[in-house]
Amino acid sequence: MKNRLRPYYPLLPVFAAYLVLFLVGRNVTGMWQLAATLVFYCALGQAFNIFLGMTGYVDFGYVAFLGIGTYGMATAITGLAGYPQLGLGIVAIGFILAIVMATLLSMAVGAVALRLRGAYFAIATIGVNEGFRYLIEGANLWNGSSGMIFTAQLNEILGRDLSSRIMTFWADVMVLFIAAAAAVVTLLYMKSKIGYALTALREDEDAAKVMGINVTKYKIIAFITSASFAGTVGAASWALKTPYVFPPEVFEIHYTIEAIIIVMLGGAGTMLGPVVGALIYGISKYYLSIFLPGFQLFIFALVIIFIIVMFPEGVVGVIKGKTRNTAIAPYIM
Amino acid sequence: MKSFSFKPFVFLIVCLFFFSATSAFAAPPDEIVIGHPACLSGKYAKAGEQAVGGIEACIHWVNSEYGGITLDGKKVPLTYKKYDCESKKENVTSLIGRLITVDRVDVVFAPYSSGLTLRGAPIAEGHSMLYMDHGGANNKIFEQGFQYTVQTIGPATSYHKGTLDMVKKIAPDAKKVALAYEDSEFATMVMEGAKTHAEELGFEVVFERTYPKGVTDMTPMLSAMKATDPDFVLGGGHFEDGQLFNRQMSDLNIDVDCLSLIAAATLPAFYEALGNMAEGVMGPSHWEYGVTYSQEAAKEIGTRWIGPSQDEFVSLFKEAVGDQDMVPDYHAAEAGAQVLAYVLAAEKADSVDSGKVRAALGDLEFMSFYGTWDISDSGLQVGHSMVDVQWQDGKREIVWPESAQTGKPCYPMPTFDEKAEGEKALP
């Protein structure tokens, strides 16, 4: 029994961190919104890690998948507002739309961009993000540049009390579940043929090809999976938590930069890395903005440089190296 | 054995009851705290810095000149608790959560922009906390059913109302208006309002087209606009495209009687960049230094006056930001005026309870250095009038509304050929 569960040990510290975040948020006054922000960063990091961590490719257009997921949920709520009898079913439809739309976009992007490598891939993905945003604005899709504000529709469908609870609590809980699900999928991938193939291509793509690995197939699998999770994060954390969407906000590149920092800080390709990275990033930014408002970004830049210099493989990468062959090794992957 | 006496317990319970009963009739607090997730860094840092300066200036005035907020006959000082939200929505929610539950502020001032204001609204609403918006102009915020959200900044749809009213009054023969603006949430909403008001006034909208953000050539659009021969043009979006708009109208010799550009034409940099070509160009603004709102003006229209005079505000602002060269703009004025609205409403409600202050805000009308203030049932600002500024001989003159005028409008403005020869726009 013990041996059968051993492969899943790396999930324990991740779930423990999420449980602590939830309990602190619920029980310590004034902590819920901070916990929600940290959970958002954890989910963003976990989802991004599936692609960046496992393939080594840096997708600078990642926020586009969060954006399209936000539009998926927004479309469901505004389009089905005339059917209040669907109730919470509309939220479920919103998530399905978010996943489908993020998947379709990632397939379209992946078909082109994944043929490129290194800096060319990065540049192409930036172009996709900006191009998609301008397509929405220029073609007046989903109300174009005017965006969509749909708090009133959510109130109409679910009633003011329930929609308020969703905006201030349940949307954050949904993000927590998405983060946990992303961690489970990461582990399953790591323990399967997909993970081995991705590890091989991350280390040397040409060698992996020569060995007969269909690298394109595995890159696309990781890309679509990562994009689908991003779509659900956008649907829950942006569309449900604050029911509005303006194109410049949901395609803002700084979210991609934040995702990269979180993953690199914690340790790319590790299970626990995105969680550790998200906690360091989110907590230090929050308290610096409270105690040194206006100066936090400068100090934070120094902190990041220090951590990157001290822990080039990320915090979890270093811990993993130092705990090899110890009792806690099975928990750190 | 001595018998057990209940008397001390009964006495204790009576004391506790008396204490809790007196607590229920809450005594005025020692201070009233305004909480603010301010945009001190990030893309709205400039507007955020102005807003913080305006708030601090007016709080200083309330505490030192006005004596504090009168609650239950006691003067209570205002204090200000701010954090830096970095102009990011994730930070807005976590900081508003902290302000309400940890710092226990009495009112939350929204961050700058419609998006960030919308981000914080559900959190404030969830805590039944008064949420005052001085930087989110989107009308749709007030169509969402928020009960504790009120607006000080004028709604986007009102930006060009004054310009249209002015043209209607001084040039009754003008009929044709062209709308050409940036494809953005803000400019689109401004022009929606302009179009509606133009049609109400009987103008014919002969041209309406948008251009993308970051546009580098407007000549195809402007050529199409020229073919419709408009009497006046309303347009713009941001500073860069506003400049380009004016320059390329000059290149194409598109002479109209009036040109009003949002966001660009009111900035000193606009005239610095275009020189004489900017003469006569107008722009709407929430507030400009030079407006003539005063105690006397308030008395004339029969409304209450509160706050520092315009010059006092400017001086307090400079003191608050610690920079004598920094001049307050409308971001500072509207944020400062919001402090004054809160003061009057709290006094009217004789309470800092958000529900009571919100109700009092609904019944409130007053004038300050920022102008008049009144909100609709949904919290939308309906009392504040925009001012229209026109470049005349290198100076910004407030030409509309008449109650705030520092100079008469120059209509029609000189042609581009005349301006190239050095003619100034003088009334």
Image (tube, coloured by chain):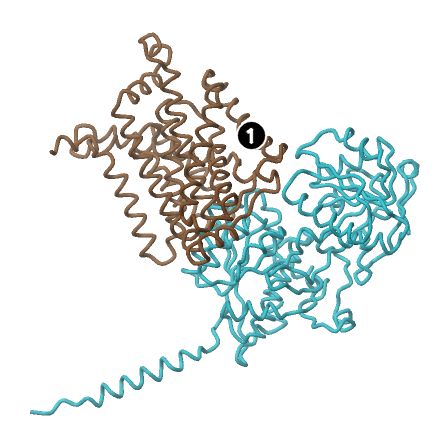
Chain colours: A brown, B cyan
**Looking at the picture, which amino acid does disc 1 mark?**
Phe
Location of residue A44 (image quadrant): top left
The image shows residue A278, relative to residue B148, as above or below, that is above
Q: Closest to the observer: B398 or A175?
A: A175
* Residue at image mark 1: A132
Judge left or right: residue B359 versus residue A201.
right
Instruction: Write down the chain letter for disc 1.
Output: A
Residue drawn at 43 percent across, 58 percent down: A161
Whether residue A257 is visible, yes or no, is: no
**Count the marks: how many?**
1
Residue A147 appears left or right of B416? left
Image quarter of the N terminus of chain B? bottom left
Q: Residue at x 50, y 32 (%)?
A: A64
Q: Is residue A22 left or right of residue B284?
A: left
Quadrant assignment, res B10? bottom left
> Does residue B228 lie above or below B332 as drawn?
above
Q: Is residue B401 above or below residue B47?
A: below
Residue at image coords 82%, 53%: B397
Name the residue nearer the viewer: B313 or B13. B13
Q: Position of residue B283 (x, y in %)?
A: 77, 48
Residue closest to the eye, B165 or A283? B165
Name which residue lies at 45% across and 31% down. Answer: A102
Residue A99's spot in the image, x, y percent? 42, 34
